[in-house]
Image (cartoon, rainbow, N blue to C red):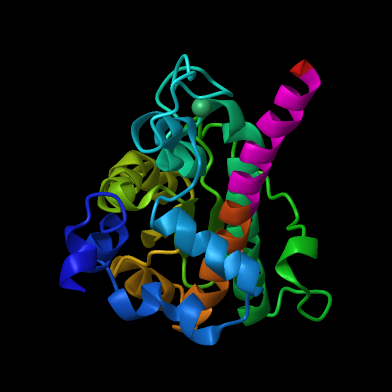
Amino acid sequence: MQEWIRKSLHGRHLQDLCHSNVDNKASNEWLRRGELFPETEGFLMAIQDQVIETRNYQRYIMKLPNLQTDNCRRCNSSSETIQHITGACKAIVQTDYKYRHDQVANIIHQSIAQKYKLLEHPPITYYKYSPETILTDRTVHYNRPDITLVDKINKTAIIIDIAIPNTHNLQKTIAEKLSKYLELKEEITRMWKLNKVTMVPIVLSTTGVIPLQLASSLRSLDLPDYTYAALQKATILNTCRIVRKFLQASQDSSQTHA
Ligand SMILES: [Zn+2]
């Protein structure tokens, strides 16, 4: 462990797990459950250990002589590190990252719908689930929250916002979500004449690292603690898919050029 954590590249994930805001045990739950294909499991560990052949890796670790740039092959705007691919590439925000985000949102949406007996069918697998669109009042001109739950009897509302940042951005993202919705919270309270509005961020990292904060978010939604394991699995599978697709696409195009 001492040797591993000292390694500047491979040790970073282990350092992340030792962070005081990270739930170490929950972050390794996907490994303990062992539900993934061995290839997927190994691939995610390679991503966590940063031994993926990105352009940055080719340049600084493999020291390939003929590489002209380590800029991202998709957006060309910054160095193509593994973190850039898993959560920071502008070129795939609206497609691959959105898809991953929406799958995690589906799990939360369906769990809540089931809890309040709003589901018109038995629960289905999250990637087949498509939540009904709920229109927000047009005077709310902020970015629309992912899920808004209004309890008309008790006059309360819960605003849920979901994000899947890279591990080093976990705490920053949680803080941003909370402050971003402060104003919206006040506006909704006033407009819908509610007694209480609660903002609940659902944040976990691209490689499945779980912040301690997630447990309290799930508790405030009155969802079972282990819900995080489903969120983690959906996130991990999507991150693996994103990285595979990213690296695959360039191989195909370089073959075409050849
Ligand atoms: Zn990029």
Reply above or below: 153 against 47.
Answer: below
Q: Quadrant of the N terminus?
A: bottom left
Q: Quadrant of residue 150?
A: bottom right
Q: Residue at x 76, y 74 (%)?
A: 119
Which residue is nearer to you in this view: 176 or 243?
243
Q: Residue at x 44, y 46 (%)?
A: 188
Reply above or below: 173 against 106.
Answer: above
For this orientation, the residue located farthest to the front is: 65
- Magenta residues span 241-256
Whole-percent x and y of residue 9? 29, 50
Q: Quadrant of residue 255?
A: top right
Residue 246 located within the stretch drawn in magenta: yes
Examine the rendering and report whether any part of residue 251 can be seen: yes
Reply above or below: 190 against 211.
Answer: above
Which residue is nearer to you in this view: 249 or 239?
249
Figure disc tally: 0
Q: Quadrant of residue 199?
A: bottom left
For this orientation, the residue located farthest to the right is: 121
Q: Residue at x 44, y 42 (%)?
A: 82
**Secondary structure mostly taken by the magenta-highlighted segment of the chain:** helix
Reply above or below: 23 against 138.
Answer: below
Which residue is nearer to you in this view: 32 or 200?
32
Q: Residue at x 31, y 60 (%)?
A: 13
Whole-percent x and y of residue 177? 35, 46
Q: Quadrant of the C terminus?
A: top right
Residue 149 located within the stretch drawn in magenta: no
